[in-house]
Image (cartoon, coloured by chain):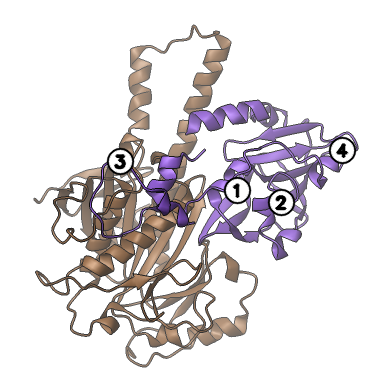
Amino acid sequence: MLSTSSITRSLARTIPRAVSGTSRTPAFRLFLRCQSTSHGNNNLNKNELPFKFSPTGPKLVKYSKDHEWLAMHADGTTFLGITDYAAAALGDATYIELPEADTEVDANDSIGSVESVKSASEVYVPVNGTVVEGNTDLESSPQLINSDPMGKGWIAKLKVDEATNKDILDKLFTLEQYEQFLKSDE
Amino acid sequence: MLRTTSFVTGGFTCVNRRILSRVWYSNGANDDNCDRLKHKSITKPVDPSARVLRHIQFTKRMPFQQGLAIQEQFVRANLDMKKVQSKIEQKLVELEHEYQGNATINSNEKQILDKILAMKPNPMVLTFEYEPTYTGGKRIKKVITQEQISQLENFKPTKDIMNPSPKFVQVERGGELTFHGPGQIVAYIVLDLKAFKNFPARCLISVIETAAKNTLKIAPVRKGGLPLNIDTKRVGDKIGVWVMNDDKIASIGVHVRRSITSHGICINVCPDLSYLNNFEMCGNPDGKATSILNEFPNANVTIQDISIAFVRELAKLLGIDTVERMQTDGSEMNQL
């Protein structure tokens, strides 16, 4: 996670002042540009569609190095989104580029993008499959990516065959492994 | 210092015309013109490859598509390196698991791996001056009509009437419609966000904004002259650089693929402002554009002066001490 000192360092603007050592005043936190709005929870939201699609929840939940999550259900229906960590790093989403319905996708293709503060970040699909539809709620409410990235802010619904993607799925992270990866990535 | 060396980036070799200067900067305190503005760095390199910032200055005006293709080559080199790094990491992890922590790689293997990882491209700024081009960001893709495109491509400017007709090009950066053309610097920043400490995309945007603001403040009016001293501000929540009366002087838009950035900023030095003021730019219906020349009619600054100043400010904010600059007219980039 972004540390306090790095946030305040990032918030320093070109204000004429004496060069101090490493101490920063909390006043710089007023600058919102680099402020983190993370919920600190990369778990799937049990109250929303990506989880509730099956009565007992998804068969498999996996995470990628590029901070995407996959919730795979027994019939192959798979929801994809970006993690809480990624959403916080991006900042307030202003525009989401969604995939077209009925398009085949290969693993590591770009499936859309999330724009925030004039930077458009690609979202990748870690598996092979077919896009059923993008989450059109994001067209009118891109902020769902920030308020509920692990639930209402899902980006795409796909049809994924578990057997043909077995090798890929095995290499993706579990939640534990993803959280471990986040720690080592800092 | 004139020296010819070659550097290999990803899949192609480029022979430097000249490395004009390898400049070392202390971070703030001793620089000229820096007394009033102590620029503390916002981040710092955490990967050895990020300790040098490369500035490739394209001195000849060129079509937009050509600059885009050049940028894409460098981005590809970065993405390919990421893939290689990822494969190496994965293999090492697999070895760990297979041999239960008793795996070691011998010194030869380690040398090879180190050499491969040392090929990671340095962070880079490419600065261009383009022929008249209107570009649309991702947001424009689904909404712009053929009629609107025709309007843009048929536009006749009021001042620089000898320019070729504008072209419209759709690109993958964030943001909406903007204009690039003669008299304007377009700077592309291609780097790996992960090579810097705690540096998500929105911090890069902040750094680009601040570097532009600093440049407009302290770049000299003419060689050896006083600073431009152009004061700038942000307008509400919007990203970009405006002068104090709300006219826009620089526009920002960035693309991120697996932490590799592309696109960046365009700064108006002396373009024909009619290109910008006759259409709605950047999604701002009431916005008006300005330029350095418009703000300071006696200024004698060139695109190249401002490019160099901007890269210098950017390096400081990124915590990078060394900038390697290379000038080229772009002709040697066409080998691939």
Instruction: In the picture, one chain is brown; tell me its letter.
Output: B
Which residue occupies the foreground of this view, B115 or B253?
B253
Which residue occupies the foreground of this view, B167 or A6?
A6
Q: Are marks 1 and 2 in contact (CB under 8 Å)?
A: yes
Task: Using the numbered discs, state the Cα–Cα distance from disc 4 to disc 2 in whole angstroms.
Answer: 22 Å
Which residue lies most toward the right here?
Answer: A55
Task: Using the numbered discs, state the Cα–Cα distance from disc 3 to disc 2 in whole angstroms.
Answer: 38 Å
Residue B27, x across and y down, in percent: 22, 47
Residue B204, x across and y down, in percent: 42, 53
For image coordinates 75% across by 60% down, the residue present is A137
Q: Which of marks 3 and 1 is in front?
A: 3
Q: Name the residue under label 4.
A: A75
Question: In the displayed structure, does residue A157 sit left or right of residue B141?
Answer: right
Residue A117 image label: none
Which residue occupies the foreground of this view, A130 or B262?
B262
Q: Name the residue under label 3.
A: A22
Q: Mark 1 points at which residue?
A: A87
Task: Using the numbered discs, state the Cα–Cα distance from disc 1 to disc 4 in whole angstroms.
Answer: 28 Å
For image coordinates 21% across by 73% down, the residue present is B228
For image coordinates 19% across by 79% down, the residue present is B299
Q: Which chain carries label 1?
A: A
For image coordinates 32% across by 81% down, the residue present is B271
Residue A173, x across and y down, in percent: 64, 29
